[in-house]
Image (cartoon, helix red, strand yellow):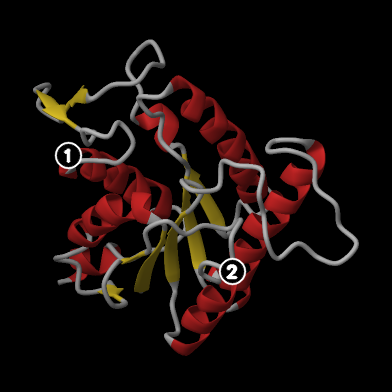
Amino acid sequence: MRLWVAGDSLVITPGYAVYRAFGRNDAVEPVGDVDGRVATGLTRPDVFNWFRHVDEQVREEEIDTVVFGFGGNDDHDYMTGVPVGVSLDGFGGPKWTKEYRRRVGGLMDTANQAGALVVWLGLPITGDSSQSRRFRILNKAAAAEAARRSETVAYVDMYSLLSDDDGGYAPYLPDAGGRLVKVRADDGVHLKRAGGDLVAKEVVRRLRPMVDVWSWKNQE
């Protein structure tokens, strides 16, 4: 399985954790480094055109599975590359959301049509309640598009995964042994290594029903 991880800066830490999770599995081959690009997203293809880049990568590199993480810089009204004749309302409005969902679904389809499975990382809860509300809007759009393609796209709910028992922001969470570990960076947005490891574990869990890169070990 040729595995590629791509997205904005929020994909970097969990992306490396995913690579580590598969590190000793000879059936999985990472495609290059984690392709995390700071200050990019789906609303500003004039800054970096992810739609063109993903299309080129999944075809040229013959990628089998891609882990996407987008949205960290998309929580605003402004959007470029809007089709001619399409007008937008404000962030989260019906027209804005329809166009954003078109872009999310388009990336999923581009990967699927090239033969790749997709794991889409939702945005995490953050230390800023206003930002968290905006992230929930983006998560709802991505989760809906993933649900339409449930056989080839898995959605990982990082928001819930990294929340405390009351659904609030948690800089520390218990590890597998019950010990509290720091999972969030000091900016209240990005993840520390332990947080990335939690996400990677969920990525592996979601991939198991979709692709088998484990059973060969039982035949050795």
- Element at badge 2? loop
- Determine crowd level at label 1: few under 14, some 14-19, many 20+ residues with C-alpha closer than 10 A: many
- Element at badge 1? helix
Which image quadrant is residue 218 in?
A: bottom left
Whether residue 115 is visible here, answered yes or no, is no
| Residue at image coords 32%, 77% | 31
User: Would you name the residue on which mark 2 appears?
Assistant: 46
Disc with the residue nearer the chain's start (1 vs 2) = 2
| Residue at image coords 76%, 62% | 82
Amino acid type at circle 1 is Ala
User: Would you name the residue on which mark 1 appears?
Assistant: 194
Residue 26 location (% of width, % of height): 20, 74
Residue 152 location (% of width, % of height): 57, 60
- Toward the bottom, the furthest residue is 60
Distance from the alpha carbon under mark 1 to that under mark 2: 34 Å
| Residue at image coords 33%, 29% | 162
Residue 106 location (% of width, % of height): 67, 64
